[in-house]
Image: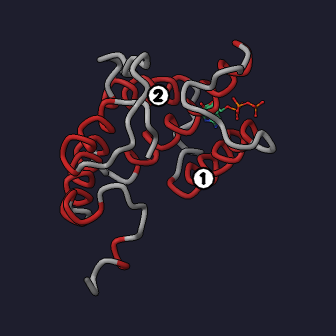
Amino acid sequence: MSATNGDDINCTRMCGDNTVPPKDDLPFTFSQEPTLEQLRQTQNTFSKERNWGKFHQPRNLLLALVGEVGELAELFQWRGEVKDGLPGWTEPEREHVAQEMSDVLIYLVRLAEKCHIDLPTAAARKIELNRLKYPVDKVCGSSKKYTEYTAD
Ligand SMILES: Nc1ccn([C@H]2C[C@H](O)[C@@H](COP(=O)(O)OP(=O)(O)OP(=O)(O)O)O2)c(=O)n1
């Protein structure tokens, strides 16, 4: 877990983990819009206009998604550990990261649409499941996999 956002402060309060975020670090937030549903619609229109629906089958989309994850990984390759906020990265480098992350998200949203998975609802539900699987009082400050706690 990184030490620079509000979630860490919560964790510190709830379980006494002494990983304290730097005081001058402002929490980072996303814009409220576009929502995932808006992105789904926009990408759907983009695809219809080009008659690309025939290419956007689940397996093709999954391969495209993995390719874009590779392109994103390439930007971090050989740089060693990278700090929150990408300090020292140039604007063109940051823009490149933003574009590759966007490609990953766009293909994931399109894949979810094609699989009829309501992605925002599924993701929120998964975080709830993760909460149950990783109770704060048991795991705070530890990165162990849940299977390592079952014997406790
Ligand atoms: N059949 C396709 C091709 C592209 N795209 C859209 C989704 C991605 O956001 C982006 C991917 O475009 P490119 O394949 O040109 O890949 P990059 O934008 O990553 O370009 P490059 O590979 O030169 O970095 O375009 C799409 O929806 N369907």
Answer left or right for 17 relative to 43: left
Seen at 37% across and 79% down, the residue is 148
- Is 68 left, or right, of 16 in this rendering? right
Q: Residues within 10 Å of mark 2 (few under 14, many from 20)?
A: some
Query: Which label was assigned to residue 60?
Result: 1
Q: Amino acid at mark 1?
A: Asn
Q: Which mark is residue 113?
A: none
- Residue at image location 52% in from the left, 30% down from the top: 47
Mark 2: is the Cβ under 8 angstroms from ligand 1? yes
Closest to the observer, 100 or 79 = 79
Q: Element at badge 2?
A: helix
Q: Amino acid at mark 2?
A: Gln
* Distance between the alpha carbons at the discs numbered 2 and 1: 16 Å
User: What residue is disc 2 on?
Assistant: 43
Q: Circles 2 and 1: CB distance less than 8 Å?
A: no
In the image, 33: left or right of 107?
left
Question: Picture coordinates of residue 12 (x, y %)?
Answer: 27, 42
Q: Is residue 56 above or below residue 133?
A: above
The kind of secondary structure element at disc 1 is helix
Q: Quadrant of residue 88?
A: top right
